[in-house]
Image (spheres, rainbow, N blue to C red):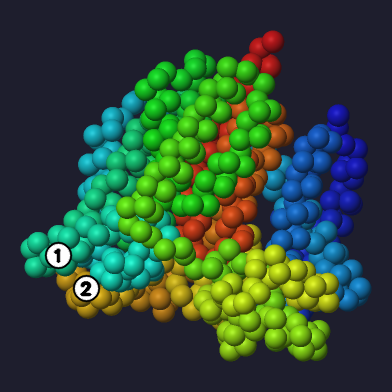
Amino acid sequence: MKNNFFKSDSRFLLLSIFTVSVFPYNYPLTEASSIIQNSLWIFLIAPIYYFYKFSFSGVSRKKLKYCGSLALLFSLILKVGRELILYSKLSYSISSILKNLIVVLGISILICSVLIFLLNLSTFDKIKNSTNKVHGFRFFFFFFLIVWMPMLFIFWPGIFSYDVPMQMSELVNNDVSTHHPIIHTLLINIVIVIGKIFGNYNLGGLIYTLIQMLICIGINAYICSRLSHYKLSRIFYYLLVGYYLFFPLNMIFSIVATKDVLFSTFFFLLIFKLCEYYVFEKNLLSRNKAIELILIIVLVGLFRNNAIYALLGTLPFILFMKKRKKRNNLLFVFILGIFFTLVSNQAFVAITSARPGMQGQMYSVPLQQLARSYINNPDSFSKKEKEELFSYVPEVNLRNYNPRISDYVKGSFTLKHKGNTSIKFLKLWARIGRKNKSNYLDAFLMLTQGYWDPNLQFPDKFYKQPIVELKTYNTVLSKRFYEDSKLPNIRKKIIDRFYTENSYKKIPLFSLLFSSGFVIWILLVTCLYSIYNDLRDFYFIFVFLILYYGTLLLGPVTLVRYVYPYMLVWPILTVFVIIKANEKNIISLTK
């Protein structure tokens, strides 16, 4: 059914003027700067007017409803993010809320028109210029090896940052912790074992880096070779391959010895295989393919504990799949994969006598909320509540509150003091929360902003770390890991670009690919597009992605390495959803 609201040129003109008048208030500029900027935005009235006229003319109600609801949510996110970047909190006065709602409405019209335009682009009757040449795994493997190998020479023998020095310390002191995936800590032991045998820890570091790099190259090459079997537009296909080959974070992460790299790569393979086997393949899985999927699930679960929670949470949604045989097959694979993951993990704990991880990790969000409330509204705590809070977290930690990272608060959290329990802590958290609703909301939004706001890219004024840590830390083994670069001058230039110049932020559009929030929004749009086209075969995959994303929101800090799995997944998932939607549209047209 067509929508008759957008039929007058004067309405398009009014909408374009409205959009331009509120546009500056959606960017991280002060109010005074926004008013000055308005004089520049006025030149956009004419192009926006013609764009509205082109996009909205003859749009159906279904399309308008789908794009409009998504646009409202997106514009709300942009506005909230802007307020947090400028003021580190939201204003809850009636006048501020009304003003912000007007801005949200104005910018949502523009976003809605863009979404309608993209939706029209994605729905075509035939896939033209489709790929017809199948490229083999070996071809891509050597291609990736040639393109990525210079990074290894630049950062020889690899980048040992993030938690790696801590894991090495645990191994040397025979004090392994479940805070890090035990399987990854054991892999890091390669550095120590080889170093002791040959008297050269850098050689051990190089062997670990090569193993990780070859796994990453192998999986990327395999997926790119498999994509050549699908009837993709040549442009789409070459863009996909180019993204995986040349995207800087993909190249750099392959030599960063953090647990998140191998997890992300196995996660990438799992999503690809789920798409292949349960969306595009008509036949049930053979025994070998089922075993293959179970092994991939086990690897994903072993390298990230919170992936197990997402897999478990996905099980009930699989029950809603219509095709009984596929549903039972998928349940079987998931249940066995989860079972073997839990058994394997417990075996690793028993073998290494690993101690429990940091107690405060799972309470990152509540601790941030309590700390912010204590600093901003100390009078809301009674003397007894303060004493109770200090028994869990020392006051000095609360005063070290940083809105972007919970490490400074949660580091000393303990349940070991007499009378301390998780239930009592959560009751305290709930009591304080009733008196600090705005502080609780602001604390959560500031901690998680990087996961949903496309405009926020680290480093910022609160969190100074770059999006990827390229400097190898000193370890208990050696202080010389970073001194072996074969191309030290290039290494210095790359580090300067990431640490001091933040050059990636200065490239229009391309810089968005480095934004965790933007990547998450691409996947959300893809998810809603699958719902719009009733592509039910994809639903369980998106449920898994959403549940895993939920575990990130409860984490201690927003880091790009935590979102790296989604950076790998979004291109293939977007293309697969478009392929399936086009297949469905073609079938419906031929009936």
Identify which amino acid the numbered label 2 is placed on. Answer: Leu
What residue is at 56 percent from the left and 53 percent from the top? 519
| Residue nearer the viewer, 459 or 536 | 536
Q: Position of residue 403 (x, y in %)?
A: 62, 77
Neighbour tally class for label 1: few under 14, some 14-19, many 20 plus, Cα within 10 Å: some
Q: Position of residue 429 (x, y in %)?
A: 73, 71
Above or below: residue 11 compared with residue 392: above
Identify which amino acid the numbered label 1 is placed on. Answer: Gly
Q: Which mark is residue 308?
A: none
Q: Is residue 145 left or right of residue 553?
A: left
Quadrant of the image occupied by residue 574: top right
Quadrant of the image occupied by residue 169: bottom left
Q: Which mark is residue 195?
A: 1
> Looking at the figure, which quarter contains the N terminus?
top right
Q: Secondary structure at mark 2?
A: loop
One can see residue 570 in this view:
yes
Distance (Cα) linking label 2 and label 1: 9 Å
The residue where tag 2 is placed is 477
